Amino acid sequence: MFSFAPTIVLFPLLGFLFLGLFGARLRNEKLIGILGSGTVGLSFLVAVALFIHMLGLEPDQRKGIVELFSWIGTFTGTASSVNVSVAYQVDQLSILMTLVVTGVGFLIHVYSIGYMHGDPGFWRFFTYLNLFIFAMLNLVLADNFLLMFLGWEGVGLCSYLLIGFWYDRKFDVGGYAPGKAWTNDAAKKAFIVNRIGDFGFLLAMFLIVVQFESLSFDAVFGRVSVMTPGSDVMIWITLLLFLGATGKSAQIPLFVWLPDAMAGPTPVSALIHAATMVTAGVYMVARCSILFALAPATLQVVAVIGALTAIMAATIGLVQNDIKKVLAYSTVSQLGYMFLAMGVAAFTAGIFHVVTHAFFKALLFLGSGAVIHGMHDEQDIQKMGGLKKYLPVTYKTFLIGAIAIAGIPPFAGFFSKDEILWKAFSSDQGSVLLWAIAAAGAGVTAFYMFRLVILTFEGKERFDHHHAHPHEAPKTMTVPLIVLAFLSVVGGFIGVPESLMGGNALEHWLEPIFAPAMTTLRATPHHGGITEYLLMALSVGIAVAGIYGARTVYMKRQELADAWRSKYRRTYQVLWNKYYVDEAYDTLFVRSTVKASETVLWRGLDVSVIDWLVNASAQGVAWLSSKVRLIQTGFAQRYATIFVGGIVLVLFWLMFK
Amino acid sequence: MEITISDLWQSAPMVSLTLTGLVALLVESMKGGRTTAVYGLSLAGCALAFVFSLWSLGSEVIVFNGMILQGGYASYFSMVFTSSAFFTIVLSRPYMQRLHREQGVLYILILFATVGMMLMASAMDLIILFLGIELMSVCLYVLTGFVRTKVTSNESAVKYFLLGAFATGFLLYGIALVYGTAGTTNLKLISQSFAQLSGNSLFLMGAGLLVIAFSFKVAAVPFHMWAPDVYEGAPTPVTAFMSTGAKAAAFAAFVTVFIRTFAITGTPISEVVAFIAAASMILGNVTAIAQSNLKRMLAYSSIAHAGYMLSGIAAGSAEGETGILFYLAAYTLMNMGAFGIISWVEQQDDTKLTFDDYAGFSAQRPVVAAMLSVFMFSLAGIPPFAGFFGKYYVFLAAVKADLVWLAVIGVLTSVISVYYYLRLVMVMYFRDGNATIEERVPGFAFAVIGVIAALVILLGLYPSLVVDISKTFFKL
Amino acid sequence: MILESIVFYSLAVASVGSALLMVTRRNPVIAALYLILNFFCLAGLYLTLQAQFIAVIHILVYAGAIMVLFLFVIMLLNLGDERKLSDAISPRKIIAGGLSLALLLELLSIFVTGTEGLPEYNADQALQVGTVEYIGKQLFTKFLFPFEVTSILLLAAIIGAILLAKKKPD
């Protein structure tokens, strides 16, 4: 059964190849849409079948590696050779991610048929999406670091292509220097910031090769027993891996690209920048949990960065007015929670949150897409309001998503977020401080999400009726919304904790994956009894308070919002300008780099030294070339003479050595 | 002591191809013999021999009383040769028809040349090696001068023949000296006594003369002088055949004698080969820059590629052998593809062969231009195309054999080569013009080049495909 | 022994001398005749080595068939002014001569030093392998395969020759 695993990867590849080669000639949007989503749907079906098969197996047999071919073979006999195969590993973790990627991916593909209707680049869009799914599945199913890196780079490439999909458009940068920038710039920003992270990943891979002489997960993880916990090399490997993760998953300090990435079409934001690609960092840390377990110091770093990102992004989300920007910061913040979970060794909880977040954040993004679609590309929530009358389905599903992310039981977000909060409090790596930051972040999350809901759907209609005629989205868009809304409601039941009479199916499912890491950390499960219930109630209370606050400020007493804005002007400015991180990076790195590269590298080194060297050597070679060709006279006698000359030289060397 | 049925059966690729050639000759000579029939028969013969080779790839056997080796190594090379012959035949038909020079004999000569190449690759005896080289060369001399109406074709044939005969003289001299010192021409017996023979200066001289003769056949400096003139003067498909099949055959002989029979690592022979390799890389690449004619450019490029591959010979190791085997498969594909496309663009009167004639080609024939770019990138050794891994493997072998300086020269000269390969790409894509293919290309030929381009990419993405095969048989 | 040496040295001197004369003659017909003389000297040397078969074949093929062909071609081409064949001494000739001399010296020095430790052959063995009978047996037993390959080689050569020599390029 496991041997079917490669077909999961194959279908999107076929879709990509077919659409890429013939898409431009297919004039039929429907056909392109069916082909594009059908391939992902088929992958999903195979993944489901595989999953059901795995359910029937003993836990220790739920793993299969299918080696397709040896990819980079080196010579036999040399001990230091590294052989890398294209091989796919299906286990409890990767099948879960595969289900999310193909399932949510399929829904978003279907949604795109409606959303991208009439776009001249329709086929191009589906081509890129299929390529993305292919790369993402490689990332998830890879059985070695190099193939994972291939997928990692592949999704980065697709992200770049899709952010800049409307390369002829501009988008609103927002913040301190409001203005328009080309979507291309956003794409480049995403790409370059990710490069920094990828560099970390690459270095980590080099270290792994040096240290373990292999790149396959099984071999590397099998050899960790010889490593001392907390050794320098482990800390370096994990820190560099984490640097890679911060790039892909938009964590401090590399989160700045994600909000700008909203310049891409909304389905892209839902698929790549919310549900799947940005969680790759979390997945990678979970996959390498045993390595991180050997470097407790790195785990601390991961937890702190995660918590800080969670609260920082959430506060920025409080004041943004672009519907997608709010969701983007919300994504950054939620990813922070996932890393917090990883950092406190609550790997299951982190993956749990990856899954539920995929449901509700995809839902929220697609809902925002429906709003933007209905409002003719308007994204400013100050120019919306009262839309629930016009977009009833979108409103209801969006509301479900907001409740889920706010953490109200029994919606999906509650269980996963609460699990993280509890572990942040109770686990050996956790602390009260981490819990407090995370809980505060949860309150802020509830507040800004409901601010968003209220400003968009409730209250007065602030849009211009002459220009905007809000209308509900077509069936291809609403059906995915409804499915995702359903999942956002019930998705949490896969991981209901034992304290709430649940079986915590997810934890049992994933147990074999994280068992080595947990053993290494000597982690013992904490059943807090009354404390756990108290904290649970407290977090629900915080969420409800956040919602209530938003309701009060933005529906009942709108003057409060303006009053606070002027009262806490400075704080507001800081938040509005996203803590000036972009500006700081701009001054510190971007401008100085540009300046240095212009003066030192370009004029100094490039023009005067390298260009000169290149030109001189090129001219030298060309001169030499023009001389040497003169030997070629065309006379056979001359050729024979040179031949004999060669013989004399060869024999001379053989004689006198 | 006689030829048995099992011997014949085990050498099925060679025997079947020979029989195809003989039958084709009969068909050709019959009254009203149709060229198309010969053409079809020759293609079928190549395909059949290819299939037989693939079939016998798994096991190596020595047949015909210790004269030749079949299966494994020999089969691998047979696959390269038959592919090369197949492509050449496909490309020759439209080319010769345009010149109104199509004759069935052309295909028959290609078949016999291929049989000669197979003998070279499977030889276990210096006599067979010699006969193989001569069979191949005689056919190539005639093929070079096949277009009798063209002066250039005739002139290059005569030049090739004269210098080829000259080289054959030294080959025989070398064989005689080796025989004189070793007392046998059997390679297996020679390899057993190589350790004591290698100190003898007469034997070394014999080996040196063999190096020289093979270097002539692979067009390595300073025995390369014939190559640019002959490559330019010969009909383009024949040039393609010479630069792929014939070169591969000469390298097969090189590998057979200097890696599989002699353990040359660390001997003066290895140094001589290294010098020849370095000189070929430097001179080939440097001179290629100054060429404006594409066939001449590819001739110098083929000298340079001979240099790269000789680095693997100089290494004298299993790695070197694997590297060369991979390189030859890649090189055969990419060079065949490049020459194939050039033969479509070229006009009857030897025009449309310069870089400038390709200005704006990408706009007129985007698919063909893309394929030609693939071949150029691959020849330049840029990943992820097949050429990259070829260079990687031979240079790696050189480094492991303590010939770092040779690998450094290889890498540096590769950089030079990027200039002239990408110049063609640049001209096709960034210069305005209306270069195109004026006469219709048959769909089959088009499809064949497409397959070659796909294979070049496939081998680049998945080099283990060939490496794993070739790794299995690097011992005698 | 002495007789053997006398025969060997006289044949050797004659063959080297005839080769030199052949290269230096201006008249191609005379040069060709010196070449025949050279072939006969070589055949004589083969005979002293008990290689009767080679000696006979050498005369039959080279001195007989090939030289006749040479002479025919030379006469048919009617080279006319033979002076063209030998110009005054040019730098090219000096280089060629120098290289040939260098090659000769190298070969000589290798032959002087390289014969140590080689297997010795006596006259009986040589007598055995040089006969027509022995070569015929070898050719049809041990070397049957190369023998068959040779037929293919000759066939290819015939095809090529006919193709190139056909009067009308059709």
Image (cartoon, coloured by chain):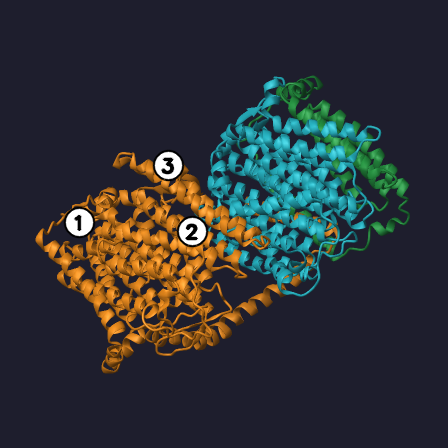
Chain colours: A orange, B cyan, C green
Residue type indicated by callout 1: Leu
Q: CA distance from mark 3 to mark 1?
A: 31 Å
Q: Quadrant of the N terminus of chain A?
A: top left
State the mark number for residue A2. Answer: 3
Q: Which residue matches tag 1?
A: A521
State the mark number for residue A133. Answer: 2
A428 lies above or below B327: below
| 1 or 2: tag closer to the N-terminus | 2
A142 and A508: which one is in front? A508
Residue type indicated by callout 3: Phe
User: Quick check: do tags 3 and 2 share a chain?
Assistant: yes
Kindly identify which chain the residue marked by label 3 belongs to. Answer: A
User: Quick check: do tags 1 and 2 share a chain?
Assistant: yes
Left-right relation of A322 to B248: left
Q: CA distance from mark 1 to mark 2?
A: 35 Å
| 3 or 2: tag closer to the N-terminus | 3
Q: Position of residue A156 (x, y in %)?
A: 41, 58
Q: Position of residue B20 (x, y in %)?
A: 70, 29
Q: CA distance from mark 3 to mark 2?
A: 20 Å
Q: Position of residue A495 (x, y in %)?
A: 23, 48
Task: Say which element carries label 2.
Answer: helix
Q: Position of residue C133 (x, y in %)?
A: 70, 17
A201 lies above or below B23: below
Mark 1, other Cα within 10 Å: few <14 / some 14–19 / many ≥20: some
Mark 2, other Cα within 10 Å: few <14 / some 14–19 / many ≥20: many
Q: How many marks?
A: 3
Report if residue A284 is visible in the image: no
Please identify the residue farthest to the left as the structure is shown: A530
